[in-house]
Image (spheres, helix red, strand yellow):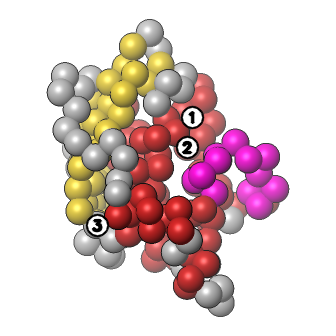
C-alpha cells in the first residue's frame, strides 16, 4: 500500500487549507449539493455560464482535506472551459482516480489535479475526490436534487 504521505501531497494540503473559489456564487445558473455519507463530506457547487463556457464556478461546504482540495482544484481548472472540455476533464479525472483506462499515461491535461491520482489506492477516498465533480455535473444540468456518492 502506498504511503499516506504520498496521498497528502503538498498541493492537496495547500488546497485543503486554503481552498480557492470557496464562496457562494451570486446569480449562479446552476447549483447542486453533494454528500458523501462514507466520510461525511458535504459540498455545494455553483456554476455560471456565458456563451457556452464556464464563466465562473465556486463551492462551499465542509469535508476532509481530500474532498476540499478536490473541489478547490476543480473550480480552478474548470473556469473558462467549454462544455466539450468540461466533459473531457470529468472523464479523465474519473479515470485517473479510479485507475481505469491506463490513466497513468495521461498527457498532463489535468495539471495540478494529478496530485489526486494517489487516491486510487484508497477506495473510500475515491468518493471524497469525486464528490465535487459529481456535484458539479448535477449543477451544470440544473439538477436540484442532492447528489450522493453511492
Ligand atoms: Zn472525505
Q: Residue furthest top?
A: 51
- Establish if 94 lies above or below 17: above
What whole-number distance in Å separates the C-alpha atoms at marks 3 and 1? 25 Å
Using the rendered image of the protein, determine whether residue 132 is visible from the camera's viewpoint.
Answer: no
Residue at which label 3 appears = 63
Left or right, 125 with reference to 106: left
Ligand 1 within 8 Å of disc 3? The answer is: yes
Residue at which label 2 appears = 90
Q: SS class of the residue under badge 3?
A: loop
Where is residue 33? Give x, y as percent: 24, 48
Quarter placement of the C terminus = bottom left
Where is residue 146? Give x, y as percent: 23, 49
Residue 67 marker: none
Which tag is nearer the camera, tag 3 or tag 1?
3
Residue at which label 1 appears = 87
**Magenta span contains residue 105:** yes
Amino acid at each position: 500500500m502506498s504511503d499516506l504521505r504520498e496521498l497528502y501531497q503538498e498541493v492537496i494540503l495547500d488546497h485543503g487549507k486554503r481552498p480557492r473559489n470557496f464562496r457562494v456564487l451570486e446569480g449562479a445558473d446552476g447549483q447542486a449539493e453533494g454528500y458523501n455519507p462514507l466520510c461525511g463530506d458535504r459540498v455545494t457547487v455553483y456554476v455560471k455560464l456565458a456563451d457556452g463556457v464556464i464563466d465562473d464556478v465556486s463551492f462551499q461546504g465542509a469535508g476532509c482535506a481530500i474532498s476540499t482540495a478536490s473541489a478547490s482544484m476543480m473550480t480552478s481548472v474548470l473556469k473558462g472551459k467549454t462544455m466539450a472540455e468540461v466533459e473531457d476533464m470529468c472523464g479523465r479525472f474519473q479515470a485517473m482516480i479510479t485507475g481505469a483506462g491506463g490513466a497513468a499515461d495521461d498527457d498532463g491535461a489535468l495539471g495540478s489535479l494529478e496530485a489526486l491520482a494517489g487516491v486510487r489506492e484508497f477506495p473510500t477516498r475515491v468518493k471524497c475526490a469525486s464528490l465535487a465533480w459529481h456535484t458539479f455535473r448535477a449543477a451544470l444540468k440544473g439538477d436540484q436534487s442532492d447528489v450522493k456518492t453511492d
